[in-house]
């Protein structure tokens, strides 16, 4: 039959083989071709004329010839190479299938490296979380002050500039616990040894710290004591407010005195101050004369030197053997030292270096008591971050204008209208300027001379002229940019 002279695909029978047989490895039809076969040879389309009429032998010679044909003329062999269905398609050494044993040997090392990196990330994240929780847990929250302030909310001033911040910093002189070495332990009672009203401008381009003398005579409102009793309203020295009614009483006294709404408060004890100074590797000062103060446990030579925490605490607390022995001079010394501390932290990049910032935060948070609005590390970090770009010459320190109290020279009273003008500037978030005391005296003398001269030369119709801009109020003080050795 005619079917005996053709194969199943309909192509002419190979003359060298019996009818019905096909060469070994030949495809039995295009529809039955194995996609992964590498030894099969694709047949030409029905009716196509083979380009190579040489007999196709089976075995090695036949396979070699097929490879030579496909490589030489780019015909059917090119199709095999593009489809990847035949070994004839591997044209170069790079096209041959790669030995997978090498990559299999490397894969375990890659997996171990990935696991190791993941482990290090987990350890770092865990350590960071542990440090954060440790610092966060150091802070003590003063909920009682917040509760009492809420009771007297109607008496408190209304904020004028919402983005500005007014923070009351209170240095406690409690002699209980670790602080008993600095004086007699009188049952744990405490007074506000240092009180500073810190005003942060709304644009965060300046910070003004105003010291309130502890001997300033003020009106202290009715306050609740620790045993839930109520004190009477009285006219007394300022630091007794902290002894009578704690932080809330002090805040209400400051608000009544200044008309400024206190947004937050911080209470720091002696040990916290010492540890912060040690955390920044000491603070440099300059002494015109040597110090030998047994009460402050301080003995220092004259000249430029760096104080550690213990020495720094004695320096800012000493009063009997330094200057005129007044609390006024001590406050000025405290202000200059705080300015030097701020300058040290900014100039040495402490605020931008986590390694150096951590000991400072650890020391600060251990001895810090705050209101609920500042009782987390994130809250404190946001506060510090908002201040880190304030120029040091715009971090200003001054004492509220005061003079000896008329009825007792050992007490102070406000100088008016200077004090009221200062409080108004801060309340309305307006700038103030500070200069050294001797320079301020010269400016005031020049101002008086100009005023008298202007009155003598003032024409009759001068009242119709527009007034000159109001100058920025200037007070005696210092900035963080001042060098203590040039004071």
Image: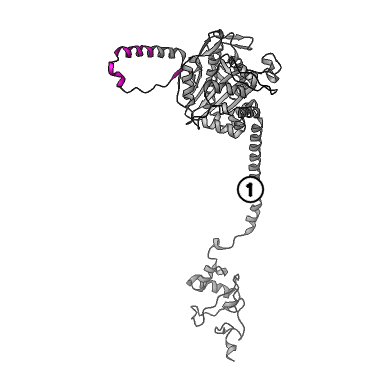
Query: What residue do we see at 64% from left, 42% from top?
Result: 120
> Magenta segment, which residues?
447-476
Residue 307 visible in the shown view? no
How is the rendered protein coloured? one colour
Quick check: 329 above or below 82?
A: above
Is residue 471 toward the left or the right of residue 486 in the image? left
Seen from the viewer's position, the closer of residues 1 and 13 is 1
Quarter of the image that includes the N terminus: bottom right
Residue 463 visible in the shown view? yes
Q: Badge 1, how many Cα within 10 Å: few under 14, some, many 20+?
A: few
Q: Which of the 4 image quarters holds residue 442?
A: top left
Image coordinates of residue 214 in percent, x first then y, are 58, 15
Query: What residue do we see at 47% from left, 20% from top?
Result: 422
Image coordinates of residue 456 in percent, x first then y, are 31, 11
Image coordinates of residue 190 in percent, x first then y, are 66, 18
Instruction: Find out whether residue 214 is within the magenta segment.
Output: no
Judging by the rendered image, the residue that carries numbered circle 1 is 114
Instruction: Find out whether residue 452 is within the magenta segment.
Output: yes
Give the total of numbered labels: 1
Image coordinates of residue 237 in percent, x first then y, are 59, 14
Is residue 11 toward the left or the right of residue 464 in the image? right
Quick check: 111 above or below 165?
A: below
Seen from the viewer's position, the closer of residues 315 and 120 is 315
Query: What residue do we see at 56% from left, 21% from top?
Result: 254
Q: Most extreme residue toward the bottom, as rendered?
A: 1
- Callout 1: helix, strand or loop? helix
Quick check: 97 above or below 159?
A: below
Seen from the viewer's position, the closer of residues 422 and 90 is 422
């Amino acid at each position: 039959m005619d079917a005996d002279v053709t194969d199943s695909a309909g192509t002419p029978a190979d003359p060298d083989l019996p009818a019905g047989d096909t060469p070994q490895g030949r495809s039995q039809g295009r529809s039955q071709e194995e996609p992964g076969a590498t030894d099969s040879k694709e047949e030409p389309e029905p009716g196509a004329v083979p380009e190579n009429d040489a007999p196709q032998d089976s075995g090695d010679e036949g396979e070699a010839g097929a490879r030579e044909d496909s490589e030489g003329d780019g015909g059917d062999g090119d199709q095999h190479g593009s489809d990847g269905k035949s070994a004839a398609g591997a044209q170069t050494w790079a096209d041959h299938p790669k030995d997978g044993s090498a990559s299999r040997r490397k894969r375990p090392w890659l997996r171990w490296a990935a696991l190791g990196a993941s482990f290090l990330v987990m350890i770092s994240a865990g350590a960071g979380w542990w440090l954060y929780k440790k610092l966060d847990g150091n802070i003590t929250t003063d909920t009682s002050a917040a509760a009492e302030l809420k009771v007297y909310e109607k008496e408190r001033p209304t904020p004028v500039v919402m983005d500005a911040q007014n923070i009351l910093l209170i240095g406690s002189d409690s002699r209980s616990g670790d602080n008993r070495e600095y004086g007699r332990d009188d049952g744990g009672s405490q007074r506000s040894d240092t009180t500073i009203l810190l005003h942060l401008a709304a644009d965060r381009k300046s910070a003004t710290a105003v010291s309130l003398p502890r001997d300033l005579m003020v009106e202290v409102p009715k306050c609740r004591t620790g045993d839930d009793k109520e004190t009477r309203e009285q006219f007394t020295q300022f630091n007794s407010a902290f002894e009578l009614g704690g932080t809330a009483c002090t805040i209400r006294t400051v608000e009544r005195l200044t008309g400024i709404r206190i947004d937050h408060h911080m209470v720091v004890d002696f040990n916290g101050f010492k540890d912060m100074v040690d955390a920044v590797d000491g603070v440099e000062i300059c002494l015109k004369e040597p110090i030998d103060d047994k009460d402050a446990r301080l003995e220092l030579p004259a000249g430029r030197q760096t104080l550690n925490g213990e020495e720094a605490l004695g320096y800012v607390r000493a009063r009997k053997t330094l200057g005129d022995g007044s609390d006024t001079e001590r406050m000025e010394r405290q202000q200059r030292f705080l300015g030097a501390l701020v300058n040290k932290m900014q100039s040495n990049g402490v605020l931008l270096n986590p390694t150096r910032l951590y000991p400072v935060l650890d020391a600060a948070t251990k001895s810090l008591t705050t209101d609920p609005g500042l009782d987390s590390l994130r809250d404190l970090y946001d506060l510090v971050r908002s201040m880190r770009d304030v120029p040091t010459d715009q971090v200003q320190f001054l004492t509220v204008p005061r003079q000896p109290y008329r009825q007792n020279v050992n007490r102070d009273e406000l100088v008016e209208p200077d004090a009221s003008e200062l409080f108004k500037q801060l309340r309305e978030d307006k700038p103030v300027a500070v200069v050294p005391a001797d320079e301020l005296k010269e400016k005031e003398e020049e101002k008086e001379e100009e005023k008298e001269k202007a009155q003598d030369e003032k024409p009759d119709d001068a009242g119709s002229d527009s007034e000159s801009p109001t100058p920025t109020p200037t007070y005696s003080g210092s900035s963080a940019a001042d060098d203590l050795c040039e004071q």
